[in-house]
Amino acid sequence: MTQSRYSLTIAGLVALVAVLFLASLLTGPAAMGAGQSLAALFGRGDEMLVLIMRELRLPRAILGLFVGAALGMSGAVMQGFLRNPLAEPGLIGTSASASLGAVLAIHTGLSAAWALALPVAALAGAALSVVLVLMLAGPRGGALALILAGIAISALAGACTSLVLNLSPNPFAANEIVFWMLGSLADRSMLHVWIAAPLMALGFAALWPTRRALEALTLGEDAAASVGVHMGRLRLMLIAGIAALIGGATAVAGSVGFVGLVVPHVLRRAVDASPARLVPASALGGAAVVLAADIAVRVIAPGRDLKLGVLTALVGAPFFLHLILKTRREGL
Amino acid sequence: MLELRALSFRRAGRVVLDGIDLRIGAGEFVGLLGPNGVGKTTLLRAALGLIPVQGHSSLAALPVHERARAAAYMPQGRQIAWPMPVEALVALGRIAHPRAAGLDDRAAIERAIAALHLEPLRHRRATELSGGEQARTLIARALAQETPLLIADEPIAGLDPAAQIEVMRLFRHLADQGRGVLASLHDLGLAARHCTRLILLGQGRIAADGPPETVLTAENLARIFGITAHLTHGPGGLLFQPLDTIPRD
């Protein structure tokens, strides 16, 4: 594929994300005109409007951008690393462990006492999973050991989450936990943005340089090593980067499913299957999907607090089925 | 270009390689021969430092990024994970040269594509090609790396006769230009005609090493492969035709 077609794809995705970001800023229960809203964002106009724009809608749109880009990027990296289109970022156990941390914070009442307790607990869970997965997967760079370790950790964290639900003192606590786990961007503040931002930067910095290695891995681990890929270092960067992105995303938004799996899959053809080019494309695609879904939950059922994670799974699963059928027809 | 000293490897307590000493210099096209399971692939991977072994390998001692500019490697398993265009796959060899100028990369890719006659296939998806076409693509990828030494594990398996001869000629041509090639092969006839040197591996040791005439002898063929063969000298060098197996007792 030509460089220009790739640039065009990226430019198109950037434009799409920009439009959706703007649309997200302009969507909400408060009836305001577009010009009025944007003026309020820059501190002009009614004080109430300024507050809504700056403290409610702006963080929500920024978090949609962050969470979507994190999911899309780590999905593309994971699929490239494992050379498998069914891989998703949750495979190394980060999202299940981060969820467990958050659930514990809700269960113990810490999250009610201190606003930061939930994201901090989620990040602690994610960090713990990284340590465990590195210990279990051993020193050499193989992918299989990593996946098995990730599956074991996910299963354990899932079981512990179920146990917490099982032991929850009253139905309201259980309800709160379940609702949190469904994933949402509603009622987030700039504080959440400041929690997520450094993690997003860290994850991005760790994953961006892995693109050449992912490209080389198309030919298998031996061939990649022979063109200069340091497999052990690659795996370390990958685990750290994905844990930062997914840990950060889960800490501020709960678990949002299917984006990390479907988005790289959809965009693969547009970048001629190049695992390296899929990384930025998928980050932008993920941001577009989450922003769109977060607009949709506000538009479809304004009064019902439809959860973001529910919508992405509802739309994502049939879409994925469609892709499977298409792949089958093409005999691939 | 490559020096191995007392290279040994055990897998699950079984000795696979037992004290291999080997030097490969510029201008040599070395054919690595031996029956299935004798350790040819293990030897190549050990030489590159892809598996932890005892002993010394000059390539394994290099840092990973320097090794990538010293030797290219075409593994036996022909993995192509994604439906990428042939041209993009060949370009993967250039990852070994992160600081090379774009024009140098371009030129190296074009040379590799031309050498393997991949021009008509360059925009096709590699996963949709036949096994032989994929093998040619992967050889081109290793060539595009433009290293002094090329290591290939069964590069001509699955190729049609014309492509096999062309690849063997290409490797010989690289050696004649002063580069080194180490390839494991099962076609003893092609190995006899095109290689400058053959190494016969038997039970984890080097059983014979030298020019084709001294390695492919009736005695070595019987001892290592358990076959009889018709060996004559023709116009282009040694001619080899396997005849029968020798019953093992």
Image (tube, rainbow, N blue to C red):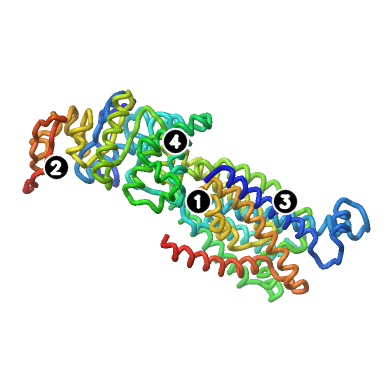
Secondary structure of residue under mark 3: helix
Q: Same chain for labels 2 and 4? Say yes or no.
A: yes
Marks 2 and 3 on same chain: no
Whole-number angstrom distance, CA of label 3 to CA of label 4: 46 Å
Residue B30, x across and y down, in percent: 25, 31
Identify the residue shown where x is 9% and y is 47%: B245
Q: What residue appears at the point 62 percent right and 48 percent down from the top-left corner?
A: A8
Name the residue tied to disc 3: A195
Disc 1 crowd rating (10 Å Cα; few below 14, some 14-19, many 20+) is: many
Residue at the spot of label 1: A273
Disc 2 to disc 4, C-alpha distance: 39 Å
Q: Nearer the viewer, residue B170 or A277?
A: B170
Q: CA distance from mark 2 to mark 1?
A: 44 Å
- Disc 2 versus disc 3: distance between alpha carbons? 67 Å
The numbered mark, 3 or 1, whose residue comes first in the sequence reads 3
The secondary element bearing badge 2 is classed as helix
Residue mark closest to the camera, 2 vs 4 = 4
In this view, the mark in front (2 or 3): 2
Q: Chain of mark 2?
A: B
Mark toward the start of the polypeptide (2 vs 4): 4
Q: Residue at x 52, y 67 (%)?
A: A322
**Amino acid, disc 2:** Phe
Residue type at numbered disc 1 = Ala
Residue B109 badge: 4
Q: Which residue is mark 2?
A: B225
Give the quadrant of residue B58.
top left
